[in-house]
Image (cartoon, coloured by chain):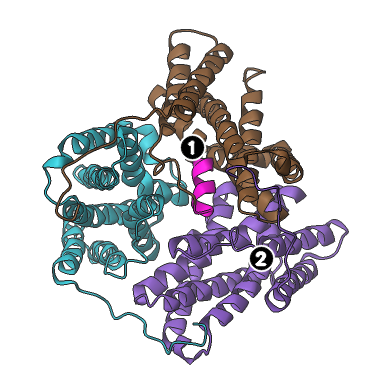
Chain colours: A brown, B purple, C cyan
Amino acid sequence: MLPYIIYFDYIGVALFAATGALSASRQQLDLMGFFFLATLTGIGGGTIRDLILDVPVFWIANQTYFVVCLATALLVYFTAHLIESRYRILLWLDAVALAVYGVFGAFKSLNITDAPFIAIFMGVVTGTVGGILRDVLTDQPNAVTRKEIYITAALVGAAVYVGLVWVGLPRFESAAIGAVCAFAVRAGTIIFGWTLPPYRGRPGRDI
Amino acid sequence: MLPYIIYFDYIGVALFAATGALSASRQQLDLMGFFFLATLTGIGGGTIRDLILDVPVFWIANQTYFVVCLATALLVYFTAHLIESRYRILLWLDAVALAVYGVFGAFKSLNITDAPFIAIFMGVVTGTVGGILRDVLTDQPNAVTRKEIYITAALVGAAVYVGLVWVGLPRFESAAIGAVCAFAVRAGTIIFGWTLPPYRGRPGRDI
Amino acid sequence: MLPYIIYFDYIGVALFAATGALSASRQQLDLMGFFFLATLTGIGGGTIRDLILDVPVFWIANQTYFVVCLATALLVYFTAHLIESRYRILLWLDAVALAVYGVFGAFKSLNITDAPFIAIFMGVVTGTVGGILRDVLTDQPNAVTRKEIYITAALVGAAVYVGLVWVGLPRFESAAIGAVCAFAVRAGTIIFGWTLPPYRGRPGRDI
């Protein structure tokens, strides 16, 4: 394990936890709702990743992740009213979290399976599942149905990471570049409204 | 394993199965819908708990749990019309199930991990996930979005159990006291409409 | 492992992937939405099955499944406009997938656990969970709430398979007969509108 890349993990968990707490704030939930959504969003993607890879779930052995989620939820609970647009900040934190945590998921999966294709896919899963769980539980449009570039950003980050490691770059540098690329794709989407071409079929009889 | 605490497990599964079947009755599903929702709600929380703790899923080795779920679904299918308010009874059975199964989840997790914090969290997961799956699948408001004290009740039960074991009380007595506390919190919520203070931020520009 | 039964697996995954991609087409998602929904629907049921049975997740060791999902998504993306009614074809592909993949789930589970009851249940899980995930994520009515015979078809297929193996028939023949039975039940439902009798309770005060 490279020493620095662990921060990708903490940062991803903390930022996703913050988006969960902000989602709770937008729906005026109580403090327990903040804790629950922060924790679910923060550790959801990594939990599914670890279950599928059949490795110990990361937050069982290291309780720091919990503390990070709960502290983030508390912080948001007491400061979110200072934010002018909670949706806007949620969107940007989510963009960084997606980039950082997606790349970390690819890093961890590549270490374990040594299979580039699986590592890229697990990066996408790690980066997107927490947010999808958050949105399904709170009945918001999710990453699949929102019709904007989101999953693609996680894919770009994971693919760049795996590609750079493949050509021999050190892992920390590869991860940093991958995360920047993923964030750039997502940021462009938020700012400029980038989209991929949607499917336009001939509308069928009953579609 | 203390001999009596296993009943917490069966009772929790049976009561959650009953709430799943009652949910099916409220939506006029067929008998298969009763079976499916009873089983999902009955074994859902414990399944996630066991997957995360990396122990064999409890109902694979012991098929009694299935029989409990199916028998409960049948019983509800043939008797639910006798109940004046199916929603009311669902609410109360769910309250007992949450209390009993949340404490059992904390008990099992503490036995396996010996980590108090994790045990409390897994108690919450065990007590709430089955009901959340039931509500998401049937498109009802779930424990997170309902804005009433629910997850907190599971937390109180699990925390009381872990706390009492910590100070040296026997496990069966600790579990009984924990379950009574959790039920009391949930019952007070149902009867008196207790709530935790919701978050009230300054409504942002686009929230 | 009997040599031919592996085709049940590929066929089930490919057909479910096609239904995921068709669902994406009906909602005019972009190509990434096709990939995501095809993969989720294609491998979702089998992933839950393998996690619960505590065996390596099938698509980690064998990347062919991915290629199948991605190729299917691409094929649907470029041909779905040729289909007169995308909903109709989705319905029929889903019927075959349910039959084939449910029986395969029962086959794999019986091999692993040697417990007939569990094998039947896991057949139902394998055959239905992918489609349920697809429908929950895209906010469509799911197998539980659609009030038509669906889960029952998977149950029939898995039970026929397990029953025929029990009486001594070879596994491949048992699987083929099980799949035909499951498909017949589902096809009858689509064509003739078969239903099981829905629950009709006395409407309670607040139900």
Which residues fall within the magenta stretch?
A128-139
Q: Is residue A25 left or right of C33 when viewed as pictured?
A: right
Nearest the viewer among C161 and B81 is B81
Is residue C122 shown to the viewer in this render? yes
Is residue B111 shown to the viewer in this render? no
Residue A147 position in % (x across, y down): 38, 39
Which residue is label 1 attached to?
A128
Which residue is label 2 attached to?
B148
Nearest the viewer among A81 and C167 is A81
Do the residues at pointers 2 and 1 share their chain?
no
Q: Residue at x 36, y 66 (%)?
A: C145
Toward the bottom, the furthest residue is B82
Circle nearer the viewer, 2 or 1:
2
Locate residue A104: give its quadrant: top right
Quarter of the image that includes the C terminus of chain B: top right
Name the chain under label 2: B
Q: Residue at x 38, y 71 (%)?
A: B33
- Compared to A142, does B94 lie above or below? below
Toward the right, the furthest residue is B167
